[in-house]
Amino acid sequence: MKILITGAGGMVGRALVAHSAACGDEVFAHERESLDITSADAVRRTFERERPEAVVNCAAWTDVDGCELNPERALLVNAEAVEILAAHSRLAGASFVTISTDYVFDGGKEGFYTQRDDPEPQSAYGLAKLQGERRAQRAAARTVVVRTGWIFGAGGKNFLATAVSRARRGEHLKAISDAYGTPTYAPHLAARLRELAGRDLPGTYHVVNGGAGASFLDFAREAVRVAGVEGVEIESVPMDSLQRPAPRPRNSRLRCLLSEAIGLAPLPHWREALKEFAEFR
Ligand SMILES: NC(=O)c1ccc[n+]([C@@H]2O[C@H](COP(=O)([O-])OP(=O)(O)OC[C@H]3O[C@@H](n4cnc5c(N)ncnc54)[C@H](OP(=O)(O)O)[C@@H]3O)[C@@H](O)[C@H]2O)c1
């Protein structure tokens, strides 16, 4: 497959580049330096030169609090640019996969969010990502939207991605005990992104690791366990104590109504995925 990957320097982008290369794809991997997705001209020139069969957009402005303080830029990167990529994918005759987020939901639901739940974003980041989904779907009928959440993997800087290495260093961990999500391992997500690009079945998918989900505290406890270290202290804190500019959903656990229906194997349980991540590090 001739696959063009944007945001190739990010946590998911890197995992996808590695996976696609291992699958024998012809990979056009673009970090921001080689392709700024907000530049329609640069996107046009890149597509004309590379003629991809599939495009996977891993680029986004993922600083949730930054987006809250600069919603215009959030819309530019996470919505307008996604539409530009979708439109050029259509012109090139390529399938288009773009990643969205659990933050399109408000977090008030008790159970799992599926495709039957109406998005109700509470933050500028969530709103821009939802706009990105919709604008892409309008610009290209072949758009595949992949909503995911709570990603961890090599090169990641968030709490989940750094918990194992911080535990190994014996650092004191502070973990939120009253916010729940479905942890997702970047290489597992990457494999599914490529699979969906190849299937070319448009729609909105929820892609997360298996299991009933976790709080940050559950995840931290498991990270300490797989790190195999003794005596690491985990401080449990309520979400509201963090006083961040952007609101986060209290529960954003995702489940997919489509994946199994089209014969995709469920991704491993997040505890298995975390073990795999810890062994790899
Ligand atoms: N991390 C999570 O827990 C999570 C949860 C749900 C959904 N997602 C979604 O998953 C996707 C991948 O996220 P990630 O965790 O891999 O994020 P990441 O590590 O922040 O990677 C995003 C990449 O996009 C690049 N980028 C930003 N603006 C760009 C632009 N204008 N043109 C080209 N590239 C640009 C960034 O480059 P710079 O570093 O130079 O800015 C970065 O390399 C995103 O769509 C995100 O919204 C993430």
Image (cartoon, rainbow, N blue to C red):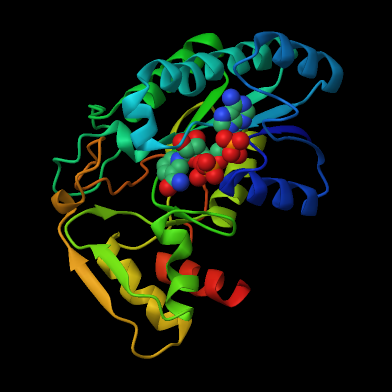
Give the camera-side residue of 242 and 254: 242
Does 193 sit left or right of 271 as displayed? Answer: right
**Residue 137 on image: x %, y %:** 48, 16
Looking at the rendered image, the quarter that the N terminus falls into is top right
Which residue sits at x=74%, y=47%? 20
**Does residue 231 lie above or below 260 as drawn?**
below
Q: Is residue 91 visible?
A: yes
Does 113 sit left or right of 3 as displayed? Answer: left
Which residue sits at x=50%, y=13%? 80
The quarter holding residue 59 reads top right
**Does residue 93 lie above or below 13 as drawn?**
above
The quarter holding residue 218 reads bottom left
Q: Is residue 259 visible?
A: no
Which residue sits at x=42%, y=37%? 63
**Residue 230 on image: x %, y %:** 38, 91
**Residue 93 on image: x %, y %:** 72, 16
Looking at the rendered image, the quarter that the C terminus falls into is bottom right
**Does residue 129 lie above or below 235 as drawn?**
above
**Does residue 272 lie above or below 192 as drawn?**
below
Which residue sits at x=41%, y=65%? 270
Does 12 sit left or right of 74 as displayed? Answer: right
**Residue 116 on image: x %, y %:** 26, 32
